[in-house]
Image: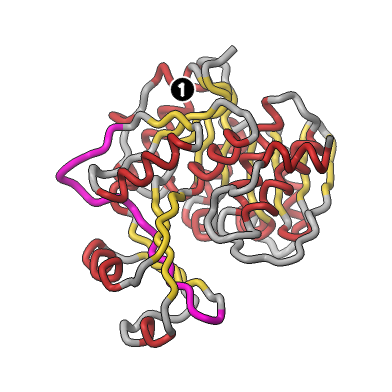
Amino acid sequence: MPQYDILAMGNAIVDVISSETPDFLSSRGIEHGCMRLIDAGEAEALYGAMGPGREISGGSAANSVVGAAALGARTAFVGRVAGDQLGQVFTHDIRAAGVAFDTAAVTGGRPTGRCLIVVTPDGERTMNTYLGACQELDASDLDAELVKASGILYLEGYLWDPAAPRAAMQAAIKVAREAGNKVAFTLSDVFCVEGHRADFRSLLESHVDIMFGNENEVKALYQTDDIDAAMAELAKHACITVVTRSEKGAVVLGGGHRYEVAGERMAKVVDTTGAGDLFAGGFMAALVQGRSFPDCARIGCISAAEVISHFGARPEADLRALIASKLG
């Protein structure tokens, strides 16, 4: 038995959510409803100007293992924070969720990554992201014994862009492979795919056992507007590939079979942030519990539906009770 079911490596980010007027954005030249990267100076200025709000830990892979932990999986996370207030928030939150997190906080470098989210009265979210310390993750943060002791190594495409984190993840893949453990990877976003298409295809061909992506990411991976053509390409690989389709559910390709699972019906969608993260966490937690591929996808869909019913990218309901009520 491995010490951990799932070990994730990814960006350690804190979401700071505040309600503001449209003038707050326009006076700062920020486009309403946009998602953009900002530098440290703007991040500090904007954080200081925002009114009272909520600080909720996030980060794609971190959200996934928090969801998996809520479903009973033994999980751990590797990601870099600074020794500042938001670094303490992230560390407290992920540990409180039952995820092992022992990556040392750094001092004297960039501050902890944060996504400053301005919510206007129309419910629109304007996201201003400073990646900060999390993009400086490197091989020194990697514990080979921890990788060996984890049944699944889960990696996020968002962290593939900077050279140092990419090298750390490549080293982790090598350790996991040599230990006979599984490697899972999420494509994360279309812009990640477009920037690293060749690398991501190479991962699928020989280094990854489980891949997650949504329809747009998969189409971008194979440079086609035809999702069926993209699925046909995915089916050529030996790994398990999981394609999410928003409200339409998900498709799983594995073992020479194709499984389609319907999405959950929602009375109201509040915030779609974290839907893919929680789907992946639910799927992997069910997989290590020995569930069938259709059940894994169903649990992923239920987990995703819970997180989009409220603000924040981490579950608020009892996921195990929710799954039991729906699947028995």
Name the residue at the left extreme: 108
Residue at the (33%, 59%) spot, across then down: 130
Neighbor class of circle 1 (other Cα within 10 Å; few <14, some 14-19, many 20+) is: many
Please say if 324 is above or below 121: above
Asked if residue 138 lies left or right of residue 144, the reply is: left
Please say if 149 is above or below 264: above
Q: Which residues are magenta?
A: 104-122
Residue at the (33%, 47%) spot, across then down: 135
Asked where in the image residue 235 lies, by quadrant, the reply is: top right
Quarter of the image with the N terminus in it: top right
| Residue 202 visible from this viewpoint | no
Asked if residue 269 lies left or right of residue 116, the reply is: right
Residue at the (66%, 46%) spot, across then down: 279
Which residue occupies the foreground of this view, 318 or 38?
A: 318
> Residue 132, percent across and down?
29, 53
Residue 112 on the magenta segment: yes
Give the secondary structure at mark 1: helix
Name the residue at the top extreme: 1
Marker count (numbered): 1
Residue 22 on the magenta segment: no
Q: Amino acid at mark 1?
A: Val
Please say if 237 is above or below 316: above
> Residue 82, percent across and down?
26, 44
> Residue 20, percent across and down?
42, 78
Which residue occupies the foreground of this view, 117 or 53?
A: 53
